Image (cartoon, rainbow, N blue to C red):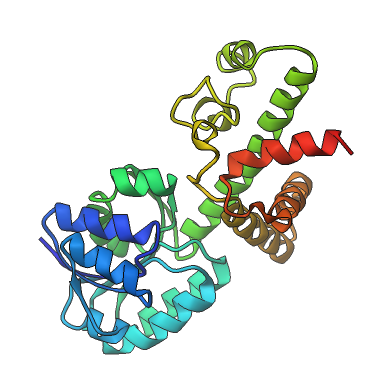
Amino acid sequence: MANIAFIGLGNMGGPMAANLVKAGHKVTAFDLVEASRDQAKADGAAIAESSVACVKGVDVVITMLPAGKHVLSVWNEVVPVMTKGTLIIDCSTIDVESAKQAHALAAKHGMLSVDAPVSGGTGGAKGATLTFMCGGEEKAFAAAKPVLENMGKKIVHCGVGGAGQAAKICNNMILGISMIGVGEAFALAEKLGLSHQALFDVASTSSGQCWALTSYCPVPGPVPTSPANNDYKPGFASALMVKDLTLAQDAAKAAGAATPLGKHAQEIYKAFDAAGHGGVDFSGIIQHVRSLAAK
């Protein structure tokens, strides 16, 4: 079993660290929030006094942080004090350029590094069923995979450093666009007198089938485990969808790619967030779609 440092114990990082403890690893954890540290301690992790103290003498360092600036700040603190050859994995969802800078920093100090953003939301974090999209050299990925398997079901090597973030951005752009489409379809069905169940029974077994429909159906009833049956509690919050769609737009601009639906999806979710619904699950976008019809 490995000696692992885990920095960033929020809604995703906390359960992920707990699963590493359950798998038998020795986990030392750190977060700026006291309540998060307390929960990690209750889950069996040792608590460090700082991020720098957290990484000393470990085999693997994992970070799970809000944005690229936070990742680079923490990596600039911890990488220089890590033992040469240590593996550092970033599971945050950040911009591709920041991920590449983090890899370069790790390489400069002789560390193995992987960017490994996740898909699966808080349910996947708690249930250890996440998908990890990994970028980095083959040697680093080979070292990271057995660790990531304690927290997820599918681990995919997407390419060189930054490729994991690229895959995550593209995947979530698809998700944001498709959830709006599913929401629009159900809103239209309501106006036409078609029941939620009837539309689900048809679309889920025909050409309208997609993950947003069959796993996260945005209306109560057809998929009992979807957030729609729990007052749209996330799950995956709309504010996080705004973040990911914005990362996709920034990447598209930098790469010279045209993503008109991605841009429109970003605008729709930004309006939903601005109206005070950033803490609502992203499938709650159907509420915004319905409100547009009333204007």
Is 173 on the left-hand or right-hand side of 104?
Answer: right
Is 264 on the left-hand or right-hand side of 173?
Answer: right
Residue 212: which quarter of the image? top right
Q: Compare residues 164 and 23 and report the one nearer the observer.
A: 23
Could you tell me how many numbered marks the image carries? 0
State whether residue 209 is above or below residue 250: above
Q: Compare residues 79 and 289 and report the one nearer the observer.
A: 289
Residue 97: which quarter of the image? bottom right
Residue 62 seen in the current view: no
The residue drawn where x is 26% and y is 60% is 17
Q: Position of residue 3 (x, y in %)?
A: 15, 69
State whether residue 82 is above or below residue 247: below
Q: Compare residues 188 and 51 and report the one nearer the observer.
A: 188
Q: Position of residue 143 (x, y in %)?
A: 24, 61
Q: Compare residues 175 and 31 and report the one nearer the observer.
A: 31
The residue drawn where x is 52% and y is 32% is 216
Is 157 on the left-hand or right-hand side of 178?
Answer: left
State whether residue 52 is above or below residue 224: below
Q: Position of residue 163 (x, y in %)?
A: 49, 58
Residue 224: which quarter of the image? top left
The residue drawn where x is 49% and y is 35% is 230
Q: Which image quadrant: the N terminus?
A: bottom left
Q: Which image quadrant: the C terminus?
A: top right
Q: Position of residue 275 (x, y in %)?
A: 73, 54
The residue drawn where x is 20% and y is 59% is 43
State whether residue 92 is above or below residue 97: above
> As drawn, which residue projects farthest toward the right?
295
